[in-house]
Image (spheres, rainbow, N blue to C red):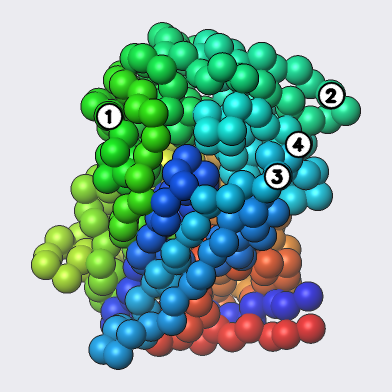
Amino acid sequence: MDKIRIVGGQSLNGTIPISGAKNAALPLMIASLLSEEKLILENVPRLADVALLQRILGNHGVDITVNGKRNGDSPSAGQTMEIDARAIVDTTAPYDLVSRMRASFWVVGPLLARMGQARVSLPGGCAIGTRPVDFHLDALRALGAEIDIDAGYVVARAPRGLTGARIVFPKVSVGATHTALMAAALAKGDTVIENAAREPEIVDLADCLLKMGARISGAGTSTIHITGVPRLRGARHSVLPDRIETGTYAMATAMTGGDVTLAGARADLLESALDVLRAAGAQIDVNNEGIRVRRNGAGLFPVEVSTAPYPGFPTDLQAQLMALMTRAQGRSRITETIFENRFMHVQELARLGATIHLEGDCAVVEGNDHLKGAPVMATDLRASVSLVIAGLAAEGETMVQRVYHLDRGFERLEEKLSNCGAQIERISG
């Protein structure tokens, strides 16, 4: 298994290009199942999860062509992916694939809407919580689907097609909103989704569906209106920049000091996180190139933060913020309200000298000026990058194991950081 070796103590200076958002690219790829015509996606990140979803869609008979860079393209330019789902040969998504990436369960909505049936494995457990799919299934039932659970598979049928309905989520769910939005796009009549997720990735999916001929309004608010259409056409769409990657590198810069421009980043996608960074002592400037983050010599201040659905502070930046607060001058409180079990990085940060106490869903971080490198082990995607951030500021060598978690969500992480002065390298084997 690969490892990442970091020798801490170097400030970050330079430019980091921000990749396309994984959390937008995956549902956009799945949306290709809704049309017999070709969907062309630009700025798709090169990630393990994207490659796995290519395999899953290929299992359904989807033909995917990935184009190389054109002359003059930036070295950091994302992939252009041509997705042709005209011939769906199989409506089953097997356990061995779905169990490796929860987002692949979302194929149930488009398959059911277009083909009238789907057999999709339940995704099983997850390192950061149970995250049941009940909301997805309730939404599909509201649209008229017949759903059974058989031997660990969701068997969904709608032989006469789906019918528009009012869907009210008891709790905000990004995944269930994606599922309902895609299924309703081909349903007969009008659908209203209430208490919908408001994340930018939902808006990006809706924008793409609109280009494909869907009739949608209200994406980005808590109430989305969809009028179903008989079929969707092909389209070309560019994946929005990754706000979680943006926040991660902004926190790494604040952690180590220095001056980094996050090229291509959009500040409007993560305003709550940028506000927290400013409160912690980082200087944030937005310009035509992206977002500039600086911290030259000033200390870090403690903060109190609770994760919340968008536009609140993202749960996907909670671990990174905790790493940053290990160096703050005082006591910080970070409350996790979205996922249970999402504090598994605490014990690994403690190996580097962090002082963190858990009080239920709240982590109390006592900042100190001294972290020391040590071997640590990643437990999930966001936890793993929090260990990288801590290692960048720790004295001596930090070795991060199980870095396959990082490859799921961060494109060329070592290269981007080393280009800004970090002493970081991947060790194979």
Q: Secondary structure at mark 4?
A: strand
Q: Nearer the viewer, residue 370 or 36?
A: 36
Q: Are marks 2 and 3 in contact (CB under 8 Å)?
A: no
Label at residue 341: none
What is the CA distance from the residue labelled 1 to the residue labelled 2? Answer: 34 Å
Q: Which residue is mark 3?
A: 90
Q: Which residue is mark 4?
A: 121
Label at residue 215: 1
Taking 396 as reference, is 375 above or below it? above
Q: Secondary structure at mark 3?
A: loop
* Quarter of the rendering containing residue 35: top left
Q: Earlier in the sequence, mark 1 or mark 3?
A: 3
Q: Secondary structure at mark 1?
A: strand
What is the CA distance from the residue labelled 4 to the residue labelled 2? Answer: 9 Å
Q: Earlier in the sequence, mark 4 or mark 2?
A: 4
Taking 232 as reference, is 81 above or below it? below
Image point (53%, 33%), residue name: 114
Image depth: mark 4 or mark 3 in front: 3
Q: Tell me the amino acid under the disc marked 1.
A: Arg
Q: Earlier in the sequence, mark 4 or mark 3?
A: 3
Q: Residue 278 at what x, y percent from top left?
A: 24, 52
Q: Tell me the amino acid under the disc marked 2.
A: Asp
Image point (36%, 66%), residue name: 43
Q: Tell me the amino acid under the disc marked 4.
A: Ser
